[in-house]
Image (spheres, rainbow, N blue to C red):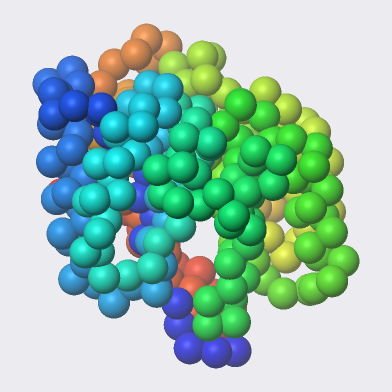
Amino acid sequence: MSESLLIAQVTDPHIRPSNISYRGVNVRQHFLNVLAVLAKKPLDLMILSGDLASVEGEPESYAWIRQALHDFPHPYVLMAGNHDHVVRMMNAFDMPNSDEVTQGMLYFSRKIKNRQMLFLDSSPYRIAKEQLEWLENKFMESDEPTLLFVHHPPVICDCKFMDEHAVLQNIDEVWKTLDKIPQIQHIFCGHYHADKTVIYNDKFIHLTPSTAFQIDTETPHFIIKHTRPGWRIIEWKNKQINTHVEYL
Ligand SMILES: [Fe+2]
C-alpha cells in the first residue's frame, strides 16, 4: 500500500446569499474560520459534501464560496445537497464541461495517491438508478478498497427530527447495490447536522457535523443543539481508516 492520505470533510455550510445571519449564526464567518484551520493541515483533499447554499442553490452563495476558496491551499471537490442546485453550482464554479456532471447529476470518482473515492449526488432526496449502476460497475473493473461520500445518510440514524422529516427516499434500493460492494466499508455523509457513526449491514456510516449549527438528535422537534462549527478528519493509512470530528 502507498503512503497515507489525509482528508477533511466539510459539510452543510448553508452560506447565505447576503451577509445576514441565519438564526443568529454568521454562517459565512463560521465557514471562513473552518477554512483557516484546515488550510494549516497537510490535507490531500477537502470534500465539501453538500448544502453549500442556504436554501435553494442561490448563485450569490456559490459566488461567495468560490471567492472564499480562492486562496485555499489544498485541492477540494464539491458535492450537491438538497439545498443545492447542480446547474447553478456548475455555472458558478465553471464546471460545465466537467466529467463530474452526467445528465445533470454531480457524481464522480477521484483517485489520489492511488486511493479511490467515489462521490454520489443525492440532492433530490434519492440516489438515481444511473448512479447505482455506475457504482456497481466500478467494482466489476476493480477490487480496491474505496471510500464513498454522499450527502444523505442511506440509513435511519436514530436522529429523531431528521429521520422523521428529511430521510433519503430510496434507502432499500440503495442497499441492493451497496450490499454487493464489500470494497466499500466506510460511507461519509452530511445533511443531519450531527456527529454520529452508525453500523449497518457491516458498513460504517459516518455523519459529519455542519459548519453552521448542529441539530439535537434526541427530540422529534427541530432544536439547534449548539452552533460550534464542526468538520471531520479522515486518515487512510495502509488498510486502516481512522476518523474523528473536530469543532472550533
Ligand atoms: Fe441536506
User: Is residue 207 in view from this perspective?
Assistant: no
What is the quadrant of the N terminus in the image? bottom right
Q: Is residue 100 left or right of residue 45?
A: right
User: Is residue 4 in view from this perspective?
Assistant: yes
Residue drawn where x is 64% and y is 40% of the image: 105
Residue 50: x and y in percent read 45, 40
Label count reads: 0
The answer to which image quadrant residue 115 occupies is bottom right
Q: Is residue 115 left or right of residue 5?
A: right
Residue drawn where x is 80% and y is 33% of the image: 173
Q: Is residue 140 left or right of residue 185?
A: right
Residue drawn where x is 53% and y is 14% of the image: 164
Residue 89: x and y in percent read 46, 40
Relative vertical location of residue 235 with respect to residue 178 in this rendering, above or below: below
Q: Decide which of 70, 14 is in the foreground and name it.
A: 70
Residue 65: x and y in percent read 28, 45
Residue drawn where x is 72% and y is 74% of the image: 144
The residue most toward the top is 221
The residue most toward the right is 140
Relative vertical location of residue 218 with respect to residue 201 in this rendering, above or below: above
